[in-house]
């Protein structure tokens, strides 16, 4: 065998060996996995407000379940008891509410991060009561002075409301499986059952109505992720 043939054979062997090693190396790289599960928590804003704001008691539980890579089934369940003092009336609203919808994560995580920047939608339903505690009759002639407050005690039961919410939010992992979150919401009232001769000035879960079908809201949450299963992510074609 000539020297040139020997060199060619050795070179061919080295190329074949390198290619085989690369295939084995690529095959040995484990596929990336993503976790799917349930995240449950509470709204810290309502919880803190119950301690620091007189006349308010509220609690909201939050949760979501990962359906696909970007879509999450999400919802909130809460209760509010709020007494509001306005210029001419004082009223108390009590009730529970439930919201359900979805979140879509628009954030592409790095490596094993599981944070969210999301757009979402909710359908909300409340069942509540409203009590008119005191009120003042508007006096068109100030010459006679302001009329004293009248104690009413009128209570309206069996009230309800249905609305939709569009929201923008974030959820960031503080440490293993514990997430802090914030969301801002625009609400639009679809239907409501109002008291006779009065109106729903405050709706649990919706907030103040301002005599308008639109409202705003937000929450600060702390939640815990409970993993249920993992799903392998297949590498995109053309990429190792």
Image (cartoon, rainbow, N blue to C red):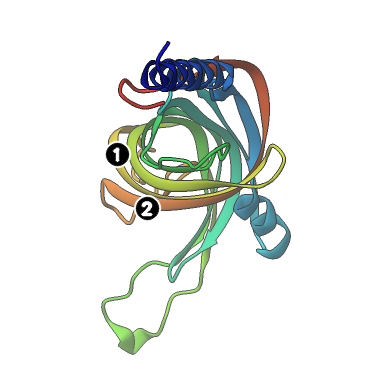
Can residue 118 be seen here?
A: yes
Using the numbered discs, state the Cα–Cα distance from disc 1 to disc 2 in whole angstroms. Answer: 11 Å
Q: Is residue 65 left or right of residue 137?
A: right
Mark 1 in CB contact with mark 2 (< 8 angstroms): no
- Secondary structure at numbered mark 2: strand
Query: Does 171 sit above or below residue 89?
Result: above
Q: Give the total of numbered labels.
A: 2
Residue toward you, 84 or 145:
84
Residue toward you, 227 or 207:
227
Residue 181 at x, y percent in the picture = 55, 48
Q: Residue furthest bottom?
A: 143
Tell me the quadrant of the picture where the N terminus can be found: top left
Numbered badge on residue 202: none
Q: Residue furthest front?
A: 2
Tell me the quadrant of the picture where the C terminus can be found: top left
Residue 208 at x, y percent in the picture = 41, 53
Q: Quadrant of residue 192?
A: top left
Residue toward you, 126 or 131:
126
Query: Does 216 sit above or below residue 122?
Result: below
Query: Does 151 sit above or below residue 234?
Result: below
* Residue drawn at x 51%, y 17% as measured from the top left: 17
Mark 1 or 2: in front is 2
Q: Residues within 10 Å of mark 2 (few under 14, many from 20)?
A: some
* Residue drawn at x 64%, y 31% as measured from the top left: 40
Which residue matches tag 2? Answer: 216
Can residue 68 be seen here?
A: no
Q: Residues within 10 Å of mark 1 (few under 14, many from 20)?
A: some
- Secondary structure at numbered mark 1: strand
Q: Quadrant of residue 143?
A: bottom left
Residue 218 at x, y percent in the picture = 47, 52
Which residue matches tag 1? Answer: 189
Residue 75 at x, y percent in the picture = 50, 29
């Amino acid at each position: 065998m000539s020297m040139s043939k020997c060199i060619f054979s050795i070179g061919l062997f080295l190329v074949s060996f390198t290619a085989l090693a690369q295939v084995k190396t690529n095959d040995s790289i484990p596929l990336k996995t993503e976790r799917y599960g349930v995240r449950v928590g509470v709204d810290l804003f309502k919880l803190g407000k119950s301690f620091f704001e007189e006349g308010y008691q509220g609690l909201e539980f939050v949760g979501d379940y990962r359906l696909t890579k970007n879509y999450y089934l999400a919802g909130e369940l809460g209760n509010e008891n709020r007494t509001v003092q306005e210029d001419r009336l004082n009223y108390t609203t009590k009730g529970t509410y439930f919201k359900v919808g979805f979140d879509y994560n628009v954030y592409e995580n790095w490596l094993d991060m599981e944070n969210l920047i999301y757009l979402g939608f909710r359908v909300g339903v409340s069942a509540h009561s409203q009590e008119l505690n005191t009120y003042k009759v508007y006096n068109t002639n100030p010459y006679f002075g302001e009329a004293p407050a009248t104690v009413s005690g009128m209570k309206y039961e069996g009230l309800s409301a249905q609305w939709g919410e569009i929201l923008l939010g974030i959820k960031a992992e503080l440490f293993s499986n514990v997430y802090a979150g914030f969301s801002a919401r625009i609400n639009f009232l679809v239907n409501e059952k109002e008291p006779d001769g009065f109106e729903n000035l405050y709706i649990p879960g919706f907030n103040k109505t301002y005599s308008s079908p639109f409202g705003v809201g937000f929450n600060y949450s702390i939640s815990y992720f409970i993993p249920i299963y993992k799903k392998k992510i297949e590498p995109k074609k053309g990429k190792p």
